[in-house]
Image (cartoon, helix red, strand yellow):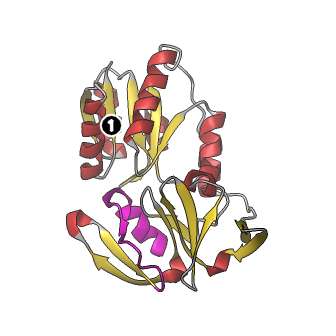
Amino acid sequence: MNVIIIEDEKPSARRLQRMLERVNVQVDQMLHSVEESVEWFANNDHPDLIFLDIQLSDGLSFEIFDEVEVNSAIIFTTAFDEYALQAFKLNSIDYLLKPIDEEELEKAVQKFNERAPQAQNVQLNFDDIKKLLTNPVEREYKKRFTTRIGQHIKMIPVDEIECFFSENKGTYAHTRDGRNYLLDPTLEQLEGEISPETFFRINRKFYVNINAIKDIISYTNSRLQLKLYSYNEQEVIVARERVKDFKLWLE
């Protein structure tokens, strides 16, 4: 299997390469921009599979396919929320949500192997994806969550939640008054239920509320540490792969 990675953040590209090597997939080439990719595809045999970031340093990766016809299977690596990802499902394109989980990566590779060569030579239509990314439809997000406390059901307004976090296979909401409440949905299920303008997934274990961030501190390995107003049970760290998108979200 011939595989290439298109990712503008070189550390993220190298990390993905190492993860693929651990599942016995050899990466043949790493590209880092739309311009570089267009030139490469024009002068080289196309791979069986592309791991493709959406937002590259010089534009959206879809622009590559406006310039050259690519017949490779594609797995997107993206930080976009679940709502936008509905378009990928419509186009039968696989995706991995950043920060990439190694188990999910292995499943995606296995899925590709099972459906190849049907996954190749498919005419991909990116119109739905472009529309959702550039003109997202207004949607309603949850205004409150419920949790059971003994025989009672408590309502928790979303604007009182500082962060959502996972611990011991449970998902919790931490509120401004310093309390933790066990919720039914997983962090992945929360993706389409909370506003991406208010909440950001900083790593595999945390969503944070932008209004709960008291301080942002440079941390080891190009990461960021967040200080929240009431949550202090463990360090709240922005994963290195999420730092760029986190800074854009803050703006």
Q: Is residue 229 left or right of residue 56?
A: right
Q: Which of 157 and 149 is in front in this view?
A: 149
Please provide the residue range marked out in magenta.
229-251
Q: Which residue is drawn at 26% across and 37% down?
A: 17
Q: Is residue 102 above or below residue 217?
A: above
Q: Write down the residue under mark 1.
A: 5
Q: Is residue 203 above or below residue 112?
A: below
The image quarter in which residue 222 lies: bottom left
Q: Residue at x 31, y 31 (%)?
A: 4
Q: Is residue 217 above or below residue 125?
A: below
Residue type at mark 1: give it: Ile
Q: Position of residue 157 (x, y in %)?
A: 71, 77
Q: Where is residue 47 in the image (x, y as percent from the top left)?
A: 35, 23
Q: Residue at x 45, y 30 (%)?
A: 107
Q: Is residue 223 left or right of residue 113?
A: left
Q: Residues within 10 Å of mark 1 (few under 14, many from 20)?
A: many
Q: Which residue is drawn at 30% across and 53% down?
A: 9
